[in-house]
Image (cartoon, rainbow, N blue to C red):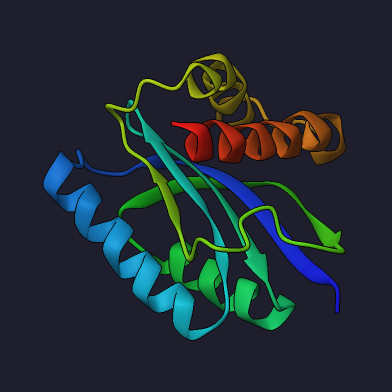
């Protein structure tokens, strides 16, 4: 079975503190597990980047909920497509909070902001962003 994936970026519409982010991470894990969606949510400096993966219908339902969430604005799909296997098969939602000191997040963040602010074409950025999520998974598993 092919796995559908979707990566988006957005800006927080309101200031989100650490307690609210923990709540978002926990509810994402709980809800995603129910519909067989895995992935990673990164939050840094008022910006989100998230990879969702699973059955296409489930991924699109989760993304539709995110679109309706008033905490997000300026949502942009960076890339979506099909894959033979998941990047995050064991994580209903891996979380990288604002305070995380992961070099890959730091290096990826200028691209995230550029995608959010000056998006041109998803195909220009899909490969490096997918590669970064795979590398982040490895970095989290090692740390």
Image location (x, y in percent) of residue 87: 69, 53
Q: What residue appears at the point 33 percent right and 25 percent down from the top-left corner?
A: 45
Would you say 30 lies left or right of 80 here? left
Q: What residue appears at the point 32 percent right and 37 percent down from the top-left corner?
A: 97
**Quarter of the picture holding the C terminus:** top left
Image location (x, y in percent) of residue 120: 77, 31
Q: In the rendered image, which quarter is residue 65 located in? A: bottom left
Up-down relation of residue 110 to residue 127 (above or below): above
Image location (x, y in percent) of residue 107: 56, 14
Farthest residue to the front: give it: 142
Up-down relation of residue 110 to residue 86 (above or below): above
In terms of depth relative to the viewer, which is nearer, 133 or 117?
A: 133
Q: What residue appears at the point 53 percent right and 83 percent down from the top-left corner?
A: 35
Q: In the rendered image, which quarter is residue 93 located in? A: bottom left
Q: What residue appears at the point 24 percent right and 48 percent down from the top-left corner?
A: 21
**Quarter of the picture holding the N terminus:** bottom right
Count of numbered labels shown in the rendering: 0
Would you say 127 lies left or right of 91 here? right
Up-down relation of residue 95 to residue 81 (above or below): above
In terms of depth relative to the viewer, which is nearer, 136 or 97?
A: 136
Image location (x, y in percent) of residue 47: 40, 34
In terms of depth relative to the viewer, which is nearer, 93 or 78?
A: 93
Would you say 100 lies left or right of 21 here? right
């Amino acid at each position: 079975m092919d796995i559908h994936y979707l990566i988006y970026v957005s800006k927080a519409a309101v200031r989100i503190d650490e307690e609210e982010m923990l709540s978002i991470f926990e509810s994402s894990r709980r809800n995603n597990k129910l519909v067989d969606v895995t992935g990673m949510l990164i939050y840094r400096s008022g910006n989100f980047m998230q990879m969702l993966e699973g059955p296409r219908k489930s991924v699109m339902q989760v993304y539709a909920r995110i679109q309706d969430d008033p905490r997000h604005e300026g949502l942009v799909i960076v890339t979506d497509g099909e894959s033979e296997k998941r990047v995050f098969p064991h994580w209903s939602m891996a979380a990288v909070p604002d305070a995380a000191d992961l070099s890959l997040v730091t290096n990826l963040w200028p691209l995230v902001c550029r995608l959010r602010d000056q998006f041109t074409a998803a195909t220009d950025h899909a490969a490096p962003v997918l590669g970064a999520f795979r590398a982040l998974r490895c970095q989290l598993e090692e740390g």
